[in-house]
Image (cartoon, rainbow, N blue to C red):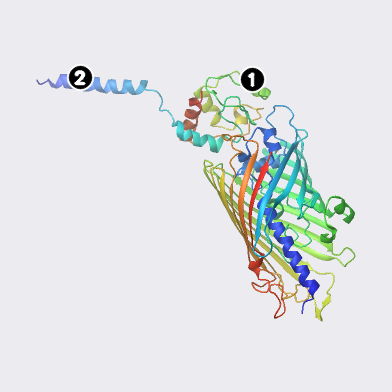
């Protein structure tokens, strides 16, 4: 069966529309959690663990995604973080970790200069997300 | 012809050098009390989860005056280490014994005060033990300062060895690794009549913008009576020093996956040895380079090179066996060390140690040459001290160490100048192989 040129053009337009519509609703490409484990070791592991209940200089990051800032029982937070009224969503972590900690949260005890490699940051957050 | 006394002194000197090298093999600055205080694992501060070589994180902990904490209340600042070893010298009897027992008082007193004190009990053979105050480093530190808008730390260290307090920890008194020296520089713990642990002093230090380190200090030798009370043999008194200045400047760059540093060091003093002798004017000038590849901590490489030149203007020119000693001379110590660590648990360290100096027939019998060359090769296993190990705050170290000499008294054979027909000692006769087990808790 053959289609008229007008029908073909309409079909192409429909397919193109579907493609862009789909692309627009796809989730943001996730990082690689296994690669993020390596990023965690190089960037975070001296001050944090991902073990539940194991604090170092910084609090345990087990279950960090979705946790309210400054809310882990048994850890002595700075006033700055206790008073920060945010939840550690992936977006918030992305914002916080991409800049010096003292710039993101003036008064924090955390000494971190920020991670400016976007791929490593995505991988790291994927790794943190995987620790529940 | 060198006297019998001179040869004996040289032989005793070599024994002391061997002891110093063994110190390098067994010494530990990985203090579990710090791990309990911070919640950190041993491996966070030491690549092989056992000291003394520091990671950049360990350097920051030291710069912060040992005061960092996990904020979980006060911890008892006490730790201990026991070391047993089986020693197989190239010449002499094998020994198996409890070599050393140490107690550390180490930790924070407040946010601004902290310290490291090691009290060491050594087995001098046949289970005769002696106890001494080993390393001392007490600090006051002001953190989180801003100078010209940059992060700055300013601190004061009171310690008993110039260079021990250095954050990069490549200088001999901090790394416990220096060339076995007949002559040797004042900054080398393996030199004869070393200053190591027998002086008291310190200085003011600062770290600017996380990268630039500077320190200015001064030292005085402890009175011989105090050395005696603290457990030291006054026969090895470093003498009286005065007008002493210690200067250190270094650039250090932590790039998380890698680290490098380049530094210079200087020590200037007037020394009377023995204490009633005319004083020698002595100036040490040195530089050091270090590099660390840390990556994801699976494979770690740490390399360091230290080069120290000492210039001496002697206060006297004794005549020995009809030969007049030279009025001036140099000593030159070099240490190259490379360590590879796998999974923060298995490590191989290779070190090349060279000490040379101005030829002087009167000062350095039997050949007038103070030159020595040695190697230290050690393989060790540290199963614990990681976040995912059985315990992260204590460790065991099983080590096999080979001390190898290729030159001593400027010679590789007949190093003590024995007359024809007498038993000779060659440099390789000073070699030793040691198996050791240390536990720190």
Judge whether residue A116 can be spotted in this image: no
Q: Residue at x 65, y 69 (%)?
A: B427
Callouts 2 and 1 on one subunit: yes
* Disc 2: host chain: A
Horizontally, is B344 left or right of B93 in the view?
Answer: left
Residue B419, how many percent across, how many down?
72, 79
Determine which of the numbered discs, if any, sits on residue B394 in the image. none
What secondary structure is found at the residue carrying circle 2? helix
Write down the residue under mark 1.
A73
The x, y position of residue B299, in whole percent, is 52, 45
Q: Few, some or many C-alpha atoms within 10 Å of disc 1 (few <14, some 14-19, many ≥20)?
A: few
Residue drawn at x 55%, y 25% is A62
Image coordinates for residue A86, horizontal then vertical, percent: 57, 19
Q: Is residue B372 above or below residue B321?
A: above
Residue B329 at x, y percent in the picture: 75, 70
| Element carrying mark 1 | loop
Above or below: residue B272 compared with residue B232: below
The one nearer the camera, B173 or A87, is B173
The N terminus of chain A appears in which quarter of the rendering?
top left
Which quarter of the picture shows residue B330? Answer: bottom right
Q: Residue at x 66, y 29 (%)?
A: A109
Q: Residue A10 carries which label?
A: 2
User: Which one is closest to the eye, mark 2 or mark 1?
Assistant: 1
Q: Residue at x 28, y 20 (%)?
A: A18
Residue B431 in view of the camera: yes
Marked residue chain, label 1: A
Q: Nearer the viewer, residue B204 or B200?
A: B200
């Amino acid at each position: 069966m053959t289609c008229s040129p007008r029908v073909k053009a309409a079909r192409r337009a429909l397919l193109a529309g579907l493609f862009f519509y789909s692309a627009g609703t796809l989730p943001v490409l996730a990082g690689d959690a296994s690669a993020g484990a390596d990023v965690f070791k190089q960037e975070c592991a001296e001050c944090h663990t991902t073990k539940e209940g194991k604090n170092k200089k910084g609090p345990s990051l087990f279950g960090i995604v979705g946790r309210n800032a400054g809310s882990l029982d048994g850890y002595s937070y700075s006033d700055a973080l206790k008073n920060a009224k945010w939840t550690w969503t992936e977006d918030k972590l992305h914002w916080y970790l991409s800049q010096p900690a003292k710039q993101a949260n003036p008064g924090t005890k955390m000494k971190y200069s920020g991670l400016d490699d976007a791929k490593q940051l995505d991988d790291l957050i994927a790794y943190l997300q995987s620790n529940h | 012809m060198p006297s019998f006394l001179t040869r004996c002194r040289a032989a005793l000197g070599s024994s002391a050098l061997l002891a110093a090298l063994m110190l390098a093999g067994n010494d530990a600055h990985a203090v579990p009390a710090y791990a309990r205080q911070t919640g950190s694992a041993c491996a966070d501060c030491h690549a092989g989860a056992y000291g003394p070589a520091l990671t950049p994180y360990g350097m920051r902990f030291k710069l912060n005056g040992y005061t960092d904490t996990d904020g979980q209340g006060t911890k008892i600042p006490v730790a201990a280490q026991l070391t047993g070893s089986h020693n197989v010298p190239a010449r002499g009897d094998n020994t198996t014994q409890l070599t050393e027992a140490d107690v550390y008082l180490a930790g924070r007193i407040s946010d601004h005060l902290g310290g490291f004190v090691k009290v060491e009990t050594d087995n001098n053979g046949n289970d005769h033990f002696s106890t001494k105050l080993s390393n001392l480093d007490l600090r006051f530190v002001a953190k989180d300062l801003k100078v010209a808008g940059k992060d700055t730390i300013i601190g004061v260290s009171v310690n008993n060895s110039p260079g021990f307090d250095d954050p990069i920890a490549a200088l001999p008194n901090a790394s416990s690794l220096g060339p076995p020296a007949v002559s040797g520089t004042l900054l080398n713990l393996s030199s004869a009549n070393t200053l190591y642990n027998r002086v008291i002093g310190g200085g003011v230090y600062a770290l600017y913008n996380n990268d630039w380190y500077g320190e200015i200090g001064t030292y005085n030798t402890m009175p011989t009576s105090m050395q005696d009370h603290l457990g030291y043999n006054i026969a090895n008194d470093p003498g009286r020093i005065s007008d002493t200045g210690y200067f250190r400047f270094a650039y250090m760059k932590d790039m998380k996956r890698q680290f490098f540093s380049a530094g210079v060091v200087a020590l200037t003093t007037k020394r009377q040895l023995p204490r009633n002798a005319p004083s020698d004017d002595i100036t040490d000038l040195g530089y050091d380079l270090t590099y660390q590849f840390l990556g994801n901590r699976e494979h770690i490489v740490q390399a360091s090179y230290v080069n120290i030149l000492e210039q001496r203007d002697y206060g006297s020119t004794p005549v020995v066996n009809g030969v007049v000693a030279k009025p001036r001379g140099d000593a030159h110590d070099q240490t190259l060390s490379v360590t590879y660590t796998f999974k923060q648990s298995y490590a191989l360290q290779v070190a090349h140690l060279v000490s040379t100096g101005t030829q002087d027939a009167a000062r350095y019998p039997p050949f007038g040459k103070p030159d020595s060359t040695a190697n230290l090769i050690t393989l060790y296993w540290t199963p614990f001290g990681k976040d995912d190990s059985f315990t992260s705050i204590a460790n065991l170290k099983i080590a096999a160490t080979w001390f190898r000499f290729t030159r001593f008294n400027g010679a590789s054979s007949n190093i003590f100048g024995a007359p024809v027909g007498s038993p000779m000692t060659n440099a390789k006769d000073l070699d030793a192989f040691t198996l050791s087990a240390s536990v720190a808790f």
